[in-house]
Amino acid sequence: MSDDLVLGKIETQMALLMRLGEATRRSTGGPAHRALDRAAYVILRQLEKDGPLNVSALATALNLDGSTVTRQVTAMQKDNLIERHRDPKDGRGTVIAATPFGLRQVEAVRQARRIVYGAVLKDYSDADKRELALVLERFTEALAEHMRTRL
């Protein structure tokens, strides 16, 4: 298969994956899977990984514009998913931190997704599941790095 055909197939599959990911979130029977929208989930996962961050650092980590992150965290604060604290490194600024409630919501979504993915991948061998995980991680890291160099 030519490189052009391979890239076309990847593009199509990525478009389908994004659509199916959102459709799965909306249609899964349990409320845990729908507990957070995609933006809140990604922000909370980043805060869970890195700890409290200022908006600029959070935007950079997520390859987003600062104003986009500001809008999202404002909505998340109203839902008690995050809280703002004075930045210990610069008392004039603030950092965003996940609340215990926000972290519980992330864990509920993560567990609900694992159940779905476990069911979808039930016929995959352990080796195939490991390979899929490695290739997806490599791809998302490369895509994130590509986006960072374009900003």
Image (spheres, helix red, strand yellow):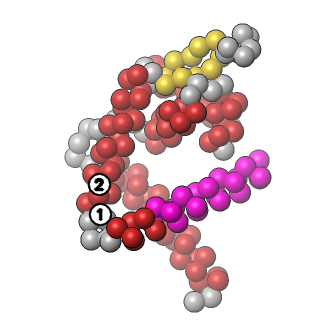
Q: Position of residue 133 (x, y in %)?
A: 46, 61
The amino acid type of the residue labelled 1 equals: Val
How much space separates mark 2 and mark 1, taking CA atoms? 6 Å
Q: Outermost residue toward the bottom?
A: 1
Q: Residues within 10 Å of mark 2 (few under 14, many from 20)?
A: some
Foreground residue among 129 and 87: 129
- Tell me the residue at 59%/13% (across/down): 85
Which residue corresponds to mark 1? 120
Tag of residue 89: none
Q: Is residue 113 above or below residue 58?
A: below
Q: Quadrant of the N terminus?
A: bottom right
Q: Is residue 122 above or below residue 84?
A: below
Q: Outermost residue toward the left?
A: 29
Tag of residue 116: 2
Side of 104 relative to 134 (left or right): left
- Tell me the residue at 31%/43% (across/down): 111
Q: Residues within 10 Å of mark 1 (few under 14, many from 20)?
A: few
* Main secondary structure type of the part rendered in magenta: helix
Q: Position of residue 67 (x, y in %)?
A: 67, 31
